[in-house]
Amino acid sequence: MTDGVRLDKWVWAARLAKTRSLAAEAITGGRVQVNGQRVKPARDVKLGDVVEVSTGPVARTVVVRGLRDRRGPAPEAQELYEETPESVAARERHAEERRLAAAPTPIAGPRPTKRDRRRLEDPRRRGR
């Protein structure tokens, strides 16, 4: 295998980005760092490099364990990197916080009548 693979191709092949153009855009936008440095999409990534990918509010920190420039099945893509324990813990903590924040609040009182539903659905009648 070669010494390195283009970062945008590797991020796409590792399924950390949905498309290669989105991977390149994330790298150019500074949401992907290699060994703590902001890089360009054409930079070669090598075995042992630490890649930090920020998607949304949580950053994934992974160590490169395999090189590939073509996208394959998801199980093969997961073999290309190893996520750090700190990154896994942060992702799980964020998922738990999101799950607790999205907990539905029970509606107080009885079921709304047809009149109440019309009032709720029509923004012009809300004040009446």
Image: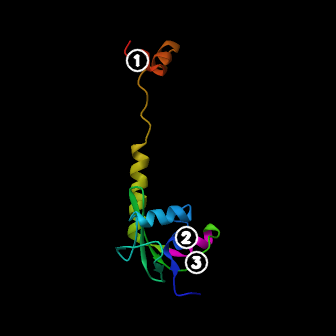
Image spot of residue 3 (x, y percent): 52, 87
As helix, strand or loop, the secondary structure at mark 1 comes to: loop
Where residue 89 sits, quadrant-wise, is bottom left
Name the quarter where the N terminus is drawn.
bottom right
- Residue in the picture at 43% in, 27% down: 107
- Stretch of the chain drawn in magenta: 75-81
Q: Which residue is mark 2?
A: 14
Residue 76 painted magenta: yes
Q: What is the x, y in percent for residue 33? A: 39, 71
Helix, strand or loop for disc 3 = loop
Within-10-Å neighbours for mark 1: few <14, some 14–19, many 20+: few
The quarter of the picture where residue 28 lies is bottom left
Query: Which residue appears farthest toward the right when viewing the image?
Result: 73
Q: Decide which of tag 2 and tag 1 comes sooner along the chain.
A: 2
Q: Three-letter amino acid code at disc 2?
A: Ala
Q: Position of residue 50 (x, y in %)?
A: 41, 76
In this view, 12 is above or below 122: below
Do callouts 2 and 3 mark residues in contact (Cβ within 8 Å)? yes
Q: Which residue is mark 1?
A: 126
Question: Badges 2 and 1: C-beta atoms under 8 Å apart?
Answer: no
| Kind of residue indicated by mark 1 | Arg
How far across and how far down the image is residue 26, in percent? Answer: 45, 63
CB-based contact (under 8 Å), mark 3 and mark 1: no
Residue at horizontal 49 percent and vertical 21 percent from the top: 121
Give the spatial CA distance, label 2 vs label 1: 50 Å
Tell me the crowding category of disc 3: few under 14, some 14 to 19, or many 20 or more residues within 10 angstroms, Cα based: many
Q: Earlier in the sequence, mark 3 or mark 1?
A: 3
Secondary structure found at label 2 = loop
In the picture, the disc for residue 68 is 3
Report the front residue among 29 and 104. 29
In this view, the residue in front, 110 or 48, is 48
**Distance between the alpha carbons at the discs numbered 3 and 1:** 57 Å
